[in-house]
């Protein structure tokens, strides 16, 4: 599935929506007073169509919720959690993890129909994956949101996963926790200023409804319980608009926080209203004027990386990619507060130590906040990150991150130091795939040099 994953590639998509690219102001005729569109609900498969997800966290404990009426026979010691989904006036949905002492066997139960009976719901196939050193369980639940003023019995898909305790500790993640994300969305088309666009509405926080009260507030990742993810307190609805017509949604310039005015083709809009199930939305002309985010230059494989010169931690200056002639260099965007970044570090350190003598280099771009250089330097030393780092203390506004329109971390590009072109990016530089990508790039460069 061509999506960005928390396991091996988060997502981790931030709540700083539509911040990259060049800002261009337009002045033109006002859009119509209201523009409505009917959408279709996608109960499952929405994450793949959107191309990303935002993991949420459900804490588990030994305390049994009072509304449980009937339970299965457990083989281990159950851990309970309450998932609030759909109509807030309804009782929460009970989630129970039945796991043996060493986490080698596990089952997951979800009270999908809200009736307090854990024996009459569709069984969840709770699959064990990974390897002995990296154990993760994953499964899909279909949960009824029971939306107000709706008689629909449609169940919405939630994908759930859990790192086994030993794996969670190794990755510096919370132990008694299940992560989950929305696999449902609303999809359709809308016509703006005479042009038809494919759109999607996504309920980022997996709340089970698309209407807003309020839709979103912003927060900061270091205050988040969800590693590496910008976390609004309770609600975030994003609208994806396929502006370039390529059939995909690029988060840098096609994802909009609908709690704020947004500009499409020179005209500014507000979301006026949206139905709880996301199947109808209405935009209106905004009284505000905001800048349009330009579609940035392509940074795909085979395209030139964007060149720059900056001061490193330690005082030296690096010119990228010019200083890496004869090398293969990975431009790595990360931060000390980013859980998924930390989870990738052991693999990156291993690859660097294995391939550095053969010409593999790493240039880190820290997205840490102001006055955190001592913290960053201590982190680098503690985690054997011996490669050069750029830190300017500007957080998501870090100069190089802005240049590359970075909207989520970790994010990396593998670049040929001779041609300056991008060799690999995305999932091919995450987890176990990193070793193979670096080896392949070095072998290709060796073959080129020998000709």
Image (tube, rainbow, N blue to C red):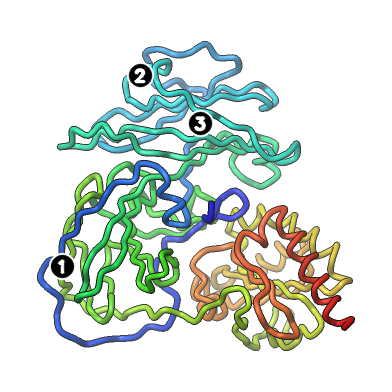
Q: Which numbered disc, 1 or 2, marks the residue that appears first in the sequence?
A: 2
Left of 288 or right of it: where is 106?
right
Label placed on residue 116: 2
| Distance of label 1 from label 2 (alpha carbons) | 42 Å
On screen, residue 36 above or below 424: above
On screen, residue 14 above or below 304: above
Tell me the quarter of the picture where residue 368 sits: bottom right
Q: Which numbered disc, 2 or 3, marks the residue that appears first in the sequence?
A: 3
Q: How many labels does the image show?
A: 3
Q: Say which residue label 3 marks.
A: 60
Residue 328, position as x, y percentages in the image:
76, 75
Residue 220, position as x, y percentages in the image:
45, 60
Q: Nearer the viewer, mark 1 or mark 2?
A: 1
Tell me the quarter of the picture where residue 75 sits: top right
On screen, residue 119 above or below 437: above
* Label 1 secondary element: strand
Q: Which numbered disc, 3 or 1, marks the residue that appears first in the sequence?
A: 3
Label placed on residue 129: none
Residue 407, position as x, y percentages in the image:
49, 67
Label placed on residue 284: 1
* Label 2 secondary element: loop
Q: Residue at x 22, y 75 (%)?
A: 268
| Distance of label 2 from label 3 (alpha carbons) | 17 Å
| Distance of label 3 from label 1 (alpha carbons) | 42 Å
On screen, residue 292 above or below 410: below
> In the rendered image, which quarter contains the C terminus?
bottom right
Residue 208, position as x, y percentages in the image:
32, 41
């Amino acid at each position: 599935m061509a999506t960005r994953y928390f396991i091996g590639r988060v997502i981790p998509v931030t709540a700083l929506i539509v911040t990259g690219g060049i800002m261009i102001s337009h002045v033109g005729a006002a859009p119509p007073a209201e523009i409505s569109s009917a959408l279709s609900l996608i109960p499952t498969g929405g994450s793949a169509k959107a191309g990303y997800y935002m993991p949420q966290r459900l804490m588990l404990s030994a305390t049994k919720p009072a509304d449980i009426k009937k339970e299965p026979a457990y083989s281990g010691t159950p851990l309970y959690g309450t998932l609030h989904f759909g109509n807030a006036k309804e009782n929460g949905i009970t989630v129970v993890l039945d796991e043996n002492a060493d986490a080698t066997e596990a089952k997951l139960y979800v009270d999908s129909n809200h009736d307090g009976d854990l024996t009459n719901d569709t069984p969840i196939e709770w699959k064990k994956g990974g390897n002995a050193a990296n154990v993760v369980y994953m499964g899909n639940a279909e949960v009824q949101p029971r939306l107000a003023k709706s008689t629909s019995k449609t169940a919405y898909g939630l994908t759930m996963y859990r790192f086994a305790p030993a794996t969670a500790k190794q990755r510096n993640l919370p132990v008694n926790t299940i992560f989950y994300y929305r696999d449902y969305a609303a999809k359709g088309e809308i016509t703006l200023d005479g042009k038809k666009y494919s759109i999607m509405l996504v309920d980022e926080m997996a709340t089970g409804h698309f209407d807003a009260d309020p839709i979103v507030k912003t927060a900061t990742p270091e205050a988040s319980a969800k590693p590496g993810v910008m976390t609004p307190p309770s609600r975030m609805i994003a609208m994806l608009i396929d502006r370039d017509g390529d059939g995909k949604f690029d988060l840098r310039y096609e994802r909009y926080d609908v709690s704020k005015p947004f500009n499409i083709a020179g005209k500014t809009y507000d979301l006026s209203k949206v139905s709880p199930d996301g199947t109808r939305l209405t935009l209106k002309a905004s009284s505000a004027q905001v800048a349009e985010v330009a579609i940035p230059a392509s940074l795909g494989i085979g395209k030139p990386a964007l060149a720059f010169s900056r001061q490193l931690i330690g005082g030296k200056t690096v010119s990228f990619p010019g200083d890496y002639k004869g090398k293969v260099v990975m431009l790595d965007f990360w931060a000390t507060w980013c859980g998924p970044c930390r989870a990738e570090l052991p693999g990156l350190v291993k690859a660097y130590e294995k391939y550095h003598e053969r010409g593999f280099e790493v240039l880190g771009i820290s997205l840490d906040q102001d006055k955190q250089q001592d913290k960053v330097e201590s982190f680098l030393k503690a985690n054997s990150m011996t490669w050069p780092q750029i830190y300017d203390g500007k957080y998501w506004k870090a100069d190089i991150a802005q240049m590359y329109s970075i909207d989520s971390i970790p994010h990396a590009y593998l670049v040929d130091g001779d041609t300056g072109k991008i060799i690999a990016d995305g999932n091919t530089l995450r987890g176990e795939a990193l070793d193979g990508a670096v080896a392949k790039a070095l072998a290709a460069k060796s073959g080129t040099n020998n000709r």
